[in-house]
Image (spheres, rainbow, N blue to C red):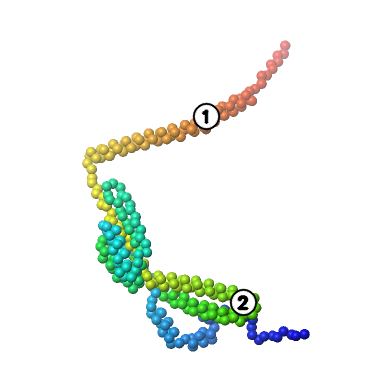
Amino acid sequence: MAQPIASDAPAVGERAQAFSAEAVGSAAGGGVGSAESHLLQVSNAELKKAAAEYAERKVIRNATVTLEVEKPAEVQAMLTSVAESHGGFVVSSEFKRTDTAGQAPPITAVTVMLRVPSSQFGMALGEIHGLGGRVKEEKTTGQDVTEEYIDLEAHLRAKRALEAQFLEIMKQAHKISDALEVQSQLSEVRADIERTEGRRRFLENQSALSTITVTLQTPAPLIATTKGGFRDSLAEAFGDCVDTGAAIITGLIRIIGVMIPVTLLILLPGGFLLRFALRRFRFVKKPEPQLSTSNQ
């Protein structure tokens, strides 16, 4: 009877698991030997490329500016020209009008969101200041994401190398179970690559284009305060008396309106029931007449 021939090579699934653990370990700072061999394979061109990546900082810059202008619609058109002249564009614009009490004109506010290249951020912000009006509020922020971006690049290189090795292992798989096992690990690696690439593209977009949010609003109307004389005070006091009397009468009407249904629906039925109960109680407790006996 023929005996099965033992193979010295490990199973495909075991090779996939072993390589996955080795690749993840080296990417996270694994064994010293593997790290040293990897560093020996790094060329001068790769070192120069890494130095250039460190030199080019990835900074997300944002600014928020509030300007008081007489004609927000005209300044809004100027903002569009400023963004386009610096290679940017308008993301969104919002118009809001608030009516004021009295004869004062309504307050108009226009909010415009601009995206300009990061290299043109300072010049675009300076031109916005030069559009006129009073700067009511301004806020500028910056977030350095260079370290995170470089970590994502290194993580992508390691995962892509792992993906290529899994593809080579899959070509050598002769069993369906081995192929399925490799395919499962390959799917996890590709999902991780997609997440990392999405985060990297987001950082690239946010650092390449800065966001400037400009709010244009008309100046608040000035309210003049004047002190009245004796007649004005007397008229104001008389008006307060009328308002107080009207409030008292209105309160009495509301109380009467509430008490009518309460009386009809609760008090009257309750009074009848209480009267009926008292009569029944007296009838039950009425003493019986006692027979008088006399000794003759």
Q: Which SS class for mark 2?
A: helix
Query: What kind of residue is marked 2?
Result: Ala
List x then y, in percent, for residue 143: 39, 71
Calculate the distance from the C-alpha at mark 2 to the C-alpha at mark 1. Answer: 88 Å
Residue 22 is at least partly visible in this image: no
Relative to residue 257, is residue 177 drawn left or right?
Answer: right
Give me the residue at 35% from left, 63% from top.
Answer: 113
Q: Residue furthest left?
A: 229
Residue with the mark numbered 1: 268
Relative to residue 178, is residue 121 drawn left or right?
Answer: left
Packing grade of label 1 (10 A; few <14, some 14-19, many >=20) is few
Give me the residue at 33% from left, 70% from top.
Answer: 87
State whether residue 15 is above or below residue 227.
below
Relative to residue 287, is residue 35 drawn left or right?
Answer: left
- CB under 8 Å between callouts 2 and 1? no
Q: Which SS class for mark 1?
A: helix
Residue with the mark numbered 2: 179
Nearest the eye: 37 or 267: 37
